[in-house]
Image: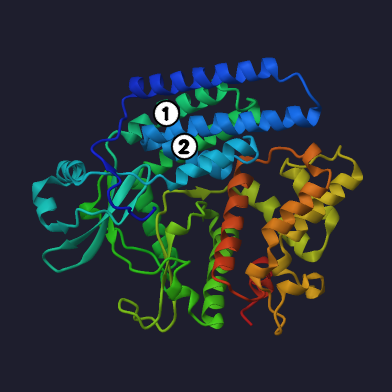
Amino acid sequence: MASKRPGNSVARIKTGSFERRLTLTRAGLFAGTRMASHMATNWFGSKDHRDKRHRKMLSSQAEFLVDELGKLKGSVVKIGQVMALYGEHFLPEEVTEALHTLEDQTTSLEWSAIERVLKEELGEQRFGELEVDPEPIGAASLGQVHRARRRSDDLELVLKVQYPGVADAVDSDLDSVTQLLRIARLVSFGPEFNDWLEEVRQMMHREVDYHLEAKTTEKFRQMLDGDTRFVVPRVLPEYSTDHIIASTYEPGHSVSSVAVKELSLDRRSELGRAALELFFKELFQWGEMQTDPNFGNYRIRIAGEPGNTNASDQIVLLDFGAVQSYPESFLEPVIRMIQASYEGDLDAVIAGGVELRFMSAEWPEDVLKRFGEVCMSVLEPLAEDVDHWPPNAVNEHGQYRWKQSDLPSRVARQAARSAISRYFRVPPKEFVFLNRKLIGVYTFIAVLNAEFNGEDLLRRYLYGEPDA
């Protein structure tokens, strides 16, 4: 969740389906009329000029519609944020860029409305056991977080409170946003897009299922029990309901804070290794993964500071509403593809891409080869052969410099220079979320400005090798 900005609050979130559908339909019709007029007149000039005018029109359309979405708040905004995060294969670039601006909208609900929810959900007696700070410490599109203290023992906790009505509005809001995109002619509908929309629907329902999130939080806490590198809040069921998750307050610094930047390179690198290994645990062992790469879901607890009795720095893991479970039928070819990439087996990488249905055996051989090479390059920081690392991506000790390597941008440029885009297929929805998670992990490590080689960690999970 985003940190709260003073003065940015409303008395209620509009969740009436008729009211919201009417607003979105009007916006879609207006945008659709503008697009139809543009298409009718954009026949003159060179192809480059027509393409430039069309991209400008798409940007204008997207910005207008995102502004309309932002006015409605609630699940509509969350749907837009999810589409921005995972829609790069389905939506025009101009649309995803505009949708990303929704991430900055952190309007909170006034305390009187939140207090009413707390009393209705907990009852007067339970609510009276707590002293709740009226000022939220975090606000998002579906709810907000308040610190609290239990009067009987001074236990510090946080209450994640869902906005009234947003859970009931998920389906109608998603249908309305989809209709808006259709009317505004901003996306081409097809089987892959419809499958992806259904996955967005399921994700949204998981996001508002606080019983599921509480259960998942406890599951991750148990799985990481004994691993002192990580902290997962303890859920307090006595204060948790359909629309409230109560958990212990776990302090920490943001990943990009000055306090974290001032840690020594060794300490930052250990945190980076911990983040990478957590990803491997999720992928190779658990088959469950926190797929939301938002840095607001993580905190760094620094050794020696109040609240950290551990001898080393720790990563605090927050918000388990976006956890995905993956079937073996998906995980097995992904892991085989990772192993083939590590071992330099290009043919096996291509076979994995074909099995996962984002490559086709019918493509030209040179395109398949180029695509496979792009996939293999993603494992650069985990490679055995470091001779191919760019000079700026390795320090004097032979360790990989995650930030300076600029790997995600280089991979994107490598793909853009090839003919891949002409043949690229929309990958399975599971792969879309996994790809976002991997990018999030790499970015997290880069923000830490960590420097280390990940090969030993990968080998441990690929081949079961013991710690060095």
Q: Amino acid at mark 1?
A: Asp
Picture quadrant of residue 71: top left
Q: Nearer the viewer, residue 113 or 386?
A: 113
Q: Position of residue 108 (x, y in %)?
A: 30, 45
Residue 7 vs 95, above or below: the answer is below
User: Is residue 465 rendered to the left or right of residue 4?
Assistant: right
User: Is residue 430 rendered to the left or right of residue 291?
Assistant: right
Confirm whether residue 74 shows in the render. Answer: yes
Q: Quadrant of the C terminus?
A: bottom right
Mark 2 residue crowding within 10 angstroms, few (<14) / some (14–19) / many (20+): many
Number of the label disc, if any, that sits on residue 79: 2
Picture quadrant of residue 449: bottom right
Q: CA distance from mark 2 to mark 1?
A: 8 Å
Q: Circle 1 is placed at which residue position?
A: 173
Q: Position of residue 331 (x, y in %)?
A: 64, 51
Give the color scheme: rainbow, by chain, secondary structure or one colour.
rainbow
Outermost residue on the right side: it is 365
At 29% from the left and 35% from the top, the residue drawn is 13
At 69% from the left and 38% from the top, the residue drawn is 426
Q: Considering the numbered disc 2 on the image, is that residue within a helix, a strand or a loop?
A: helix
Q: Considering the numbered disc 1 on the image, is that residue within a helix, a strand or a loop?
A: helix
At 77% from the left and 70% from the top, the residue drawn is 390
Residue 310 vs 209, above or below: the answer is below
Q: Amino acid at mark 2?
A: Ile
Mark 1 residue crowding within 10 angstroms, few (<14) / some (14–19) / many (20+): many
Confirm whether residue 349 shows in the render. Answer: no
